[in-house]
Image (cartoon, rainbow, N blue to C red):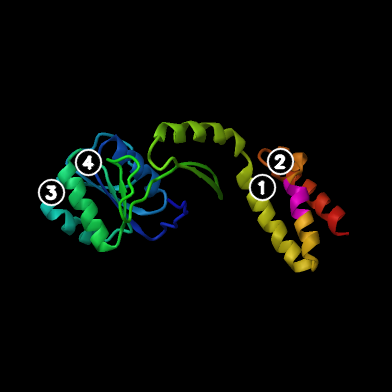
Amino acid sequence: MIPLLHDFAGRRVLIVGGGAVGARKARTFAREAETVVVSPAFADADFGGASLVRAAPTPEDADGWVRRVDPALVVVATDRTAVNDAVAAAARDHGALVNRADRSGSREAGGVVVPATVRDDPVVAALATGGTAPALSRYLRQRLESEIDGAGAMAELLGDVRERLKADEPDPETRREAILEILESSAVWKHLPEEPDKGRREADRILREVTE
């Protein structure tokens, strides 16, 4: 499998199954995509703002559900193998990606694995084991959470610095050196999360030293 980040803004996700797994998937995708969960019952109160449709899909009407929702991704998460197989087949025929939450390490055509993620926007780190050991993904995510703290603020700072350097500094080697010096500054990292103005002033000082 090849890891990719996919922009789901303006897209739809269909989740078939309203159990704990379906709820977790809904919370993941509803933060960006228009997410629809179809199930005869909903085991969790928190579906992340997804639209909940109380219905019991059958193998015979799987294609109809996929066509009505027109999703970019279909998550299969029921406890009925026949329904899961039919929904996955309908999704593939429709050209949608498929996440088989009922199978570990799925390698079927169009299959995707949803990784464990750590976010400090705009930074996103994803961890996956190909569906073979989800517990390991969760464990590594917990360890990474403390390491990524402040990365979002650093990413935004470096984005601003890059734009300034492109406008004011013609030498690409100097631009790279300035970015690296800021990135490796413990003072910038220390201040950015709690005192962003102080962190940015330190970055400005480094920038002047490198470019003048």
Task: Determine the CA span between mark 1 and mark 2.
Answer: 7 Å
Q: Position of residue 128 (x, y in %)?
A: 45, 42
- Counting residues from the start of the chain, the first of labels 3 and 1 encountered is 3
* Residue that carries the numbered disc 1 in the rendered image: 154
> Element at badge 1?
helix
Image quadrant in which you'd find residue 132: top left
Asked whether the beta carbons under mark 1 and mark 2 sit within 8 Å of each other, the answer is yes
Q: Earlier in the sequence, mark 3 or mark 4?
A: 3
Dot 2, how many residues are within 10 Å of its Cα: few (below 14), some (14-19), or many (20+)? many
Dot in front, 1 or 4: 4
Q: Which residue appears at 79% of the width and 66% of the height?
A: 168
By secondary structure, the bulk of the magenta-drawn segment is best described as helix
Identity of the residue drawn at 38% across and 46% down:
113
Question: Where is mark 2, residue-wise?
Answer: 189
Question: Which residues are the magenta region?
Answer: 178-183
Residue mark closest to the camera, 3 vs 1:
3
- Mark 1 crowd level (few <14, some 14–19, many ≥20, 10 Å Cα): many
| N-terminal label among 1 and 2 | 1
Of the residues shown, which amino acid type is indicated by label 3?
Thr
Disc 3 residue crowd, few under 14, some 14–19, many 20+, Cα 10 Å: some
Task: Label 4, secondary structure: give it.
Answer: loop
Identify the image quadrant of residue 82.
top left
Q: Which mark is residue 78?
A: 4
Circles 3, 1 touching at the beta carbon (< 8 Å): no
Which is closer to the viewer, label 2 or label 3? 3
Q: Is residue 201 above or below residue 191?
A: below
What is the spatial separation of the Cα atoms under label 3 and label 1, in whole angstroms? 49 Å
